[in-house]
Image (spheres, helix red, strand yellow):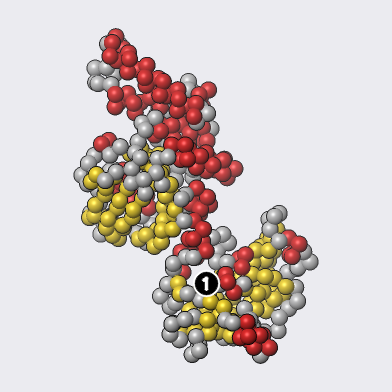
Amino acid sequence: MAAVELAAIAKSFAGTAVLRGVSLDIRDGEFLTLVGPSGCGKSTLLRIIAGLETPDGGTIRIGGRSVDGVPPKRRDVAMVFQSYALYPYMTVRQNLALPLEMRRLSTIERLPLVGRLLPGARRKRRQIEADVTAVAAALSIAHLLERRPAQLSGGQRQRTALGRAMVRHPQVFLMDEPLSNLDANLRVEARTEIAELHRRLKTTFIYVTHDQAEAMTMADRVAVMLDGEIIQVAPPQQIYDGPAELRVAQFIGTPKINVLAGRINATGGIDVAGGSWPLAVAGAEAGSVSIGIRAEAWEIDKEPAKRAQGCLLPGRVRHLEHLGAETLVHFVADSGAGAEARLVARVEPVIAAGLSMGAAISARAKPDRILVFDAAGKRIPVSAEPASTLRQVANA
């Protein structure tokens, strides 16, 4: 096991900056997920850690040792690629054994005929076979050892690729979107397998994905990467509930967070959609802000509201998504200045029953779930005002 420390990593391709001074500390034995949209630089960062790319600047330490300029094979890391990178002409057994043969056997000992006659080589090959058998059993692919990759399903190939990395007992596992080639059902199963594997091995895992579900369900911490920079590093629930920036809030979460334009007034309250909401922002200057409301932070009432007040918006249903255990209610509301905002609420099916397209509703945002971001997109603290103030707003 080993901690990984990145300091001011920079990388450009053809004059275009891909990584902009990335610094990140990954704890010993931690499962950290790098999540971000395609092209944000996360795979490039992973390849730099592995030694497959050379950074333009910055330093990397693995297990307290600088690996700047150290070739990949001497970094004691194992990488699992999106394409699995299995040798098609080799069996599963041979694919798993190859990394150990390259490490433990000399050039002569690897020769097909002469090498097998050497006493030392026979002993080493028995140990390699034992290690391969143990890893295959741990990943439930022992019955596949004599098959070739073309005879395996996507999930079986993925486990074989994991096994080839595991068999070396590396200090750090690097995974570059290893589940992207699997179908939806198999991806859920594979997520569980990888998380359980991490708990068994207690080894440092760095996992790259653009899939939010993978990032949020598997990792100890999530690093959100946008435009070549690490924007926020925190446990999954904290990333969701307390995003540091509007960009993070908009990227994390399905459906996408609702955003309304607002304004801090002279008294420190917030004006939204032509009404004053019972929220207070301490120490912030008057000016424009963005109001973020998660889909589950709405309370939908079939009784239409007359106007915006007390975190309440009048709206009209424009679409219903029935997902079984929940329903997504898409609605439009007056966001102020004659503009319409398209919003979505997540509710229980019993609440959505009886709603129809075009029906008038009222949507109330839960005050303790409202997020406020300043004009630069940075989150600012917000709190509900005292109950007496709430009553005054409601009766206004």
Considering every residue shown, the one lying at the far right of the view is 354
Q: Seen in the image, is 145 located left or right of residue 122?
A: right
Which corner quadrant of the image does residue 202 belong to? top left
Q: Residues within 10 Å of mark 1 (few under 14, many from 20)?
A: many
The residue drawn where x is 46% and y is 56% is 235
Q: Nearer the viewer, residue 203 or 93?
A: 203
Quadrant (top left, top right, bottom left, bottom right) of the C terminus: bottom right
The relative height of residue 169 versus residue 318 in the rendered view (above or below) is above
The residue drawn where x is 38% and y is 24% is 97
Q: What percent of the width, then of the height, locates residue 21?
A: 28, 60
The relative height of residue 40 versus residue 182 in the rendered view (above or below) is below
Considering every residue shown, the one lying at the far top of the view is 117
Q: Nearer the viewer, residue 69 or 31?
A: 31
Residue 4 makes an appearance in the image: yes
Q: What percent of the width, then of the height, locates residue 206?
A: 39, 46
Q: Seen in the image, is 244 located left or right of residue 8?
A: right
Q: Nearer the viewer, residue 63 or 218?
A: 63
**How many labels were placed on the picture?**
1
Which corner quadrant of the image does residue 86 belong to? top left
The residue drawn where x is 29% and y is 24% is 104
Q: Identify residue for label 1.
A: 371
Q: Nearer the viewer, residue 96 or 332?
A: 96
Quadrant (top left, top right, bottom left, bottom right) of the N terminus: top left
Q: Seen in the image, is 4 located left or right of residue 38?
A: left
The relative height of residue 361 versus residue 17 in the rendered view (above or below) is below
The residue drawn where x is 61% and y is 65% is 295
Residue 37 makes an appearance in the image: no
